[in-house]
Amino acid sequence: MTRPASLSVIVPDLDAIATFVGRVAVIVPEDGTLDPAGRRVNKLTKGALKRFVESEAFTKLAFGEARDLLCPVGMEAQALQIVKLDRRGGDEHVARKAGASIGKGMSGTDVLVLAGTVKYGADLALGALLRAYAFTDHKSEGAKTEVPTVTLALTKPEEVSVDQVTALAEGVFFTRDLVSEPANILTTTEFGNRLEALRGIGLEVEVLEEDKLEALGMRTLLSVGFGSASPSKVVVMQWKGGDDEAPLALVGKGVVFDTGGISLKPAGGMEDMTMDMGGAGVVAGVMKSLALRKAKANVVGLVGIVENMPSDRATRPGDVVKSMKGDTVEIINTDAEGRLVLCDVMWYAQERFNPRAMIDLATLTGAIIVGLGHENAGVFSNDDPFCRAFLKAAEDEGEGAWRLPMGQAYDDQLKSAIADMKNVGTRAGGSITAAQFLKRFVKEGQPWIHLDIAGVASVKADTTLAPKGATGWGVLALNRLVDDLDATPTPKV
């Protein structure tokens, strides 16, 4: 398990700057004005800081970017990092970008951040913690056991809640770790075990095994796992931090590996299908953060955990399966399996919890990547106010999300000659027809959002807050949404 850097927030101690061993980051605004900590650094380095700030190189830095001066004279630090950031201006996103510049340079080394009067200290700290992530569990030299420290020297340290920042980072790291794990490690059983361990931080966790799922009628979910020796499961996580209000339900697709089943995927790139449990990973990360920060809300997270493999027991194209709802589904393509997992879990969530609102998350379609690339998740909804609330939360957290249309013409593509519906439509509008399939399992009057995160759950290049690989997209936005909904509820939500 990857742990975020240990965060501490202190009042600036100018005398400690010279002897700090590790990295020292100093915040400098565009006009080059040095605060007391900056002036002390400049004095220690015999004017080196001021010379750099007056150089063309500093002028060319964008807000949030940084430059290192290695082995600064007069200091014991390994490096002095100059971070360009207005102390009392800007916004949360620029502060996180600046923090990310600090975190990217850490490489397991302690850092002292001379933040002074920076307005968005919590965002600066969060950016540093998130960008310092590295998944090393399977490196030959072994996982890193020593956790570095980020010491934020802030004029008003009371403005930053270490617990809140750390809780968010812990949730994002949990998601990234789950998505990064190979399928021979994160089996369906191991996934369930890791979620059961969340009882230790106050979550109520239940694991529904195959016999229970069969009794409940979750046959579409079970059909996905028929070809695998690994047992299918549904894990229910409850956080009860609110009063008596109905919970927000988060539902995640947890396909620990997706071969496509009998509709076998091409070999090229199939190794990436270890991330096909990304939706369940996000739900798990959100639930962990909510518990750690003791959110004043009721939220239930439900994840369907399966493995989609070809075998003599596997579901075949042309098979007809009955869902928990009672509708029958003609399986046209066994690689369109995520919706079969989600539909049963969504129905179960509504039947058992009658949630105030429901959000499902899934790495569901390649079509969403064609449409939106790796910058935005696809958003589909039956409730405009609820959808606007999520889109605002995503924008506030800097997590790209874009709403797409739905409609009867797309739904008509799912008509089957022998069952109530097919599990796929045509190639045209593939992400939308997937959403239409899920909508058939949303009860009348139930506010619902479907998030297709196939393009954003894991990426091939560094992002602002993460190295290439698992991003943890959605943990921050959903955490904010939980708070936003409590403050400004929509008609039902």
Image: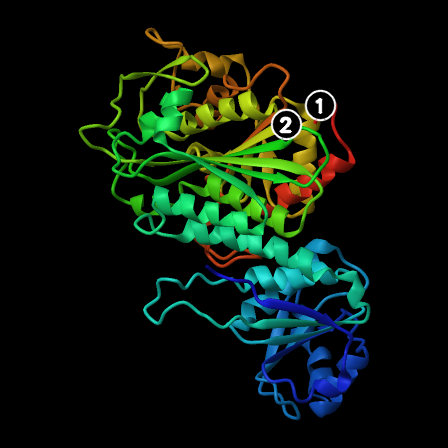
Secondary element under disc 1, as helix, strand or loop, is loop
282 horizontally vs 245: left or right: left
Does label 1 or label 2 sit earlier along the sequence?
2
Residue 98 image position (x, y, % from top left): 66, 64
In this view, the residue in front, 367 or 287, is 287
Residue 425 image position (x, y, % from top left): 40, 19
Mark 1 surroundings: few (<14), some (14-19) or many (≥20) residues within 10 A: few
> Of the residues shown, which amino acid type is indicated by label 2?
Ala
Q: Inspect this view and state whether residue 416 appears.
A: yes
Vertical placement of residue 318 versus 284, above or below: above
Colouring of the image: rainbow
State the image quarter where residue 55 is shown: bottom right
Residue in the image at 65% along x and 23% along y: 383
Disc 2 target residue: 357
Q: Inspect this view and state whether residue 429 appears.
A: no
Residue 118 image position (x, y, % from top left): 78, 66
> Of the residues shown, which amino acid type is indicated by label 1?
Lys
Asked if the residue at tag 2 contacts the one at tag 1, i.e. Cβ–Cβ closer than 8 Å, the answer is: yes
Q: In which quarter of the image is the C terminus?
A: top right
Q: How many marks?
A: 2
Vertical placement of residue 59 versus 251, above or below: below
In this view, the residue in front, 34 or 170, is 170
Q: How far apart are marks 1 and 2 (CA)?
A: 8 Å
Disc 1 target residue: 492
Secondary element under disc 2, as helix, strand or loop, is strand
State the image quarter where residue 80 is shown: bottom right
Numbered label attached to residue 421: none
Residue 355 image position (x, y, % from top left): 62, 26
In this view, the residue in front, 422 or 148, is 148
